[in-house]
Image (tube, rainbow, N blue to C red):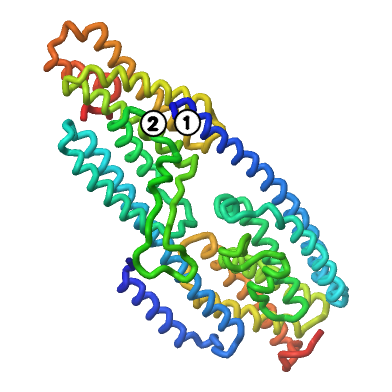
Amino acid sequence: MSVTEMFSYIQGFLSADQDVREDIRKVVQNLEQTAREILTVLQSVHQPSGFKEKGQLCSLAGKHFTASVECTGGEESFEIESEFHEHWRFVLQRLAFLAAFAVYLESENLVTREEVAQILGIEVVREKGFHLDIEDFLAGVLIMASELSRLAVNSVTAGDYSRPLRISNFINELDSGFRLLNLKNDPLRKRYDGLKYDVKKIEEVVYDLSIRGLAKESESGGN
Amino acid sequence: VCIVSGEGWSRRNVEAAQEHDVHANPSSPIVAAFKVFQQELDTKHDKYERLVKISRDVTIESKRTIFLLHRVTNRCNQLLIQLNYLNLFNVLCGFMMVVFRALGIQEYVEAVSFLHYIRHRSLISLEEINARLVFMRTENAPPLGAHVLTFQVTPADYLLGVADLTGELMRLCIGSVGNGDIDTPFQLSQFLRQIHDGFSYIGNTGPYEVSKKLHTLRQSLGKVEDACYTLRVRGSEIPKHMLADVFSSRTTHMDTEEGVV
């Protein structure tokens, strides 16, 4: 192959790459839109009337999640996913957060990675296809922690004094869990550093309730 | 190949911390989940560290090969080159299933294409490079892995490696004049021009580093073209043993950081 032929050949690849990038961008945009819609639905728990409609919220969110599944399906191949991971990262983390948040609202448990993958319609293990990285999952959990600290505050405002206690226990367990991890100095570590502020905020809420005798003794029950 | 003592230290540390962690409730499902995450993350990080080390090794070996190729003036030293090459392969074998962008690949492409040019006076193709990157795994294969492992250089890495190659070709040109070889510069000039034209064709549709390298490429091409001009105009006037001096003074005049090899 002559030099000129070689470069033409390479150019072919580069053009194809650009096309793929365009396609991915469009898919990511759709996913981000879906994520925003889900967030809007879930955000209403912060309203005073919020958690009564909790059940409806979660099923509404569920419908949107299925839509996002359709987005991710089809075009993903292993090479595309690893090479262009950065394009996906933000929206994937958001979706993980939304899934975790929805599951917490329903069951007050920490969602598992498998559950998130199922909700989003993707795999967990890299070899099987488009998958959820453990770092992205954990990032989503941390985003949820911030959301929960906000929910603790708003729960008190709405008159629910037991929820913050349950949130507090939950966040403390999350914190313990995260402290088990050997994190590198990467974005996940930086995000984890923010968890302590969430912990502190919730502790303050619990403190405010306790000294005023508003905190209920039992840790279960409530809403 | 892992740094055993380092790993052991950090694991012991973590376990000690766990025991002192008053909040940790071992029976909590959340904590149990995070223990699994811990193991998974540790494995992932270890693998990444190994990859970084291998990338560094590839870079070092590639650069050594390039220096060797510059030093070589006769065919007898081909054997030395082969050995160095083999080292590169052994190092690359360690790549296994590469999932992250590896850093030494451009240097590898640079070294391999340099060797190929010296031997064949042509540009090695991406396919030829990838055809050699097939390894047989001799030790125990992992549950998922095949016995034949391949590593593919991407078009982007190939492009960047070739861009770096042009710098070495320029040095080869100046160096060959110093050795009394007045044919190589003209061949190189032609070759380099073709590569430069190829990059111009690609323009900025390639990875963003290409634009920076294109600038250096233009400088290299300029030096080579000037060298050919000097040879053509004044080559017959200057005794061969003095040609090297003429070129070394020219290149130091043009660019203080480039020197005659």
Q: Is residue A5 above or below residue B64?
A: above
Callout 1 secondary element: helix
Residue A18 marker = none
Numbered disc 2: what chain?
B
Q: Is residue B239 above or below residue A127?
A: above
Residue B251: where, in percent of width, then height? 26, 21
Residue A133: where, in percent of width, then height? 58, 64
Q: List the residue tagged with mark 1.
A: A6
Callout 2 secondary element: loop
Q: List the residue tagged with mark 2.
A: B123
**Residue at the location (27% across, 51% down)?**
B87
Residue A158: where, in percent of width, then height? 83, 76
Numbered disc 1: what chain?
A
Residue B90 in the figure: left or right of residue A183 = left
Q: Marks 2 and 1: in contact by CB < 8 Å?
A: yes
**Residue at the location (77% across, 57% down)?**
A34
**Residue at the location (54% across, 89% down)?**
B26
Q: Is residue A208 visible?
A: no
Quarter of the image where one finds residue A157 = bottom right
Q: Is residue B43 visible?
A: yes
**Residue at the location (55% across, 68% down)?**
A192
